[in-house]
Amino acid sequence: MKTIKTFKKVLLVSLLPCALASTQSIAANIVDPLVSNVGPESDVPVAVQTLRWHMLDRDFNSLSFRSMDTLFDTRQVARAGDISKLVKSEQPMDLTYEYNGETYSADEFLDRTYTNALLVMKDGKIVYENYLNNMRPDTRHMGWSMTKSITSVLVGIAHEEGRIESLDQPIIDYIPELSDSGYAGVTIRQVLEMTSGVDYEERYDFANPGVAAKNHILALVKNVARFADASTSLERKYEPGTVSEYKTIDTAVLGWLLERVLGGANVASYAAQKLWEPLGAQQNGFFIMDGEPGVGREFTGAGFNATLRDWARFGQMVLNEGEFNGHRIVSADYIKKSTHPVLPEDDKMGGYGYQWWTMPNSNAFSAIGLQGQFVYIDPDTDTVIVKLSYFPQEEMFDLEEETLTFFDKVSNWQTH
């Protein structure tokens, strides 16, 4: 078995738009040539395509990350019933942390790392909660690839309900359309682990677009194709189960799997019934939709939006090994397997479980989304940290490192 090949830098550039490849200004009447030259014409208004094309830009993303329902068709993940109570025991976060030889306060961290909102739970209680930049408790913020961890939980639930007979079944048992692709011979578990071995490099070089960049344009900017459809033509790169290589297409395939086993229901309604309602969420969540209106699907790889507190409820459920609000949502065994590295961890970069990042030399793990989205969980200190951010693309790698340094300090913060 090969040593794990972790791709946190790839994670942080996944869904990277044209801001790295194009310096053209946003124009209401002109679609960027890097968009218009890929695939067929789109019925999406030009102005909307342009906004999607620039949604990660540093001068726009603080707003766009909490306004996704104005840029995309969406599908609600409805809340229902009583809102679960989150006990609040707030106290000043008077800690400091060191980064690159300098000492900073918690307040300085908020500005240094482009924070829209931050929440810390310890021992099941909120000890810190802060909203910035006109964020509010009812604002739903894009999670980007934190969505992958939600998709993982939904797959676990579907398996435990018997909708999926075994995680070690070939994925083509449920999606025969993949039979002539690199996914032939790959198990559902290997897709969860991102050890599928398919050849899909998570690079978004729009000046010379490869399969991932073209897929982003077709599915999410122009809405003329489904994101998961690219999986049917992928070839094999590695023997399945041997190399961990981060790729959003794997999670999109898991979303396709869920569609197939739900008996006509969609992923959003299943998430509402099996996850959002039992959590006692305070607000509807929503997925952005890929593909053409009416035939697209929830973007299960990176498209879920929720409030700060509802992200925290999800994190606390996982910390509780699948229980929350008086409900057993998914088994403790599935959570344990999901949040431990599949292959040996890298001493500096950590590892990967079932759609969760594991922290090196620690029992902590995290859902991590593009440009600074985190649900960080440390079972050893009973800590959940949710950070919703707007990292500039050119600073992402350093900002992730600083954020995880801060999280480690907060995890060990002794509250009263």
Image: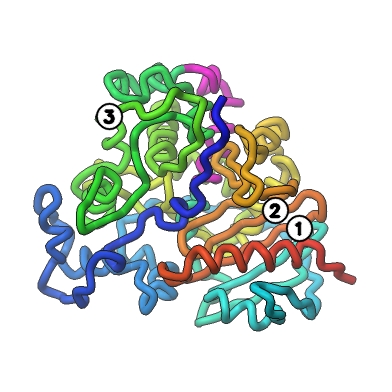
Residue drawn at the location 59% of the way across and 77% of the way down = 131
- Contact between labelled residues 1 and 2, with CB atoms less than 8 Å apart: yes
Q: Which residue matches tag 2?
A: 377
Image quadrant where one finds the C terminus: bottom right
In terms of secondary structure, where does tag 3 sit? helix
Amino acid, disc 2: Ile
Asked whether, in this view, residue 225 is left or right of residue 299, the answer is left
Residue drawn at the location 42% of the way across and 22% of the way down = 171
In the figure, 382 relative to 321: above or below?
below
Rounded to the nearest whole Å, what is the CA distance between mark 2 and mark 1? 6 Å
In terms of secondary structure, where does tag 2 sit? strand
Dot 3: within a 10 Å radius of its alpha carbon, few (fewer than 14), some, or many (20 or more) residues? Answer: some
Tell me which numbered mark, 2 or 3, is placed earlier along the sequence. 3
Q: Which residues are magenta?
A: 148-169
Percent across and percent down for residue 105 are 71, 81
In terms of secondary structure, where does tag 1 sit? strand
Q: Nearer the viewer, residue 84 or 412?
A: 412
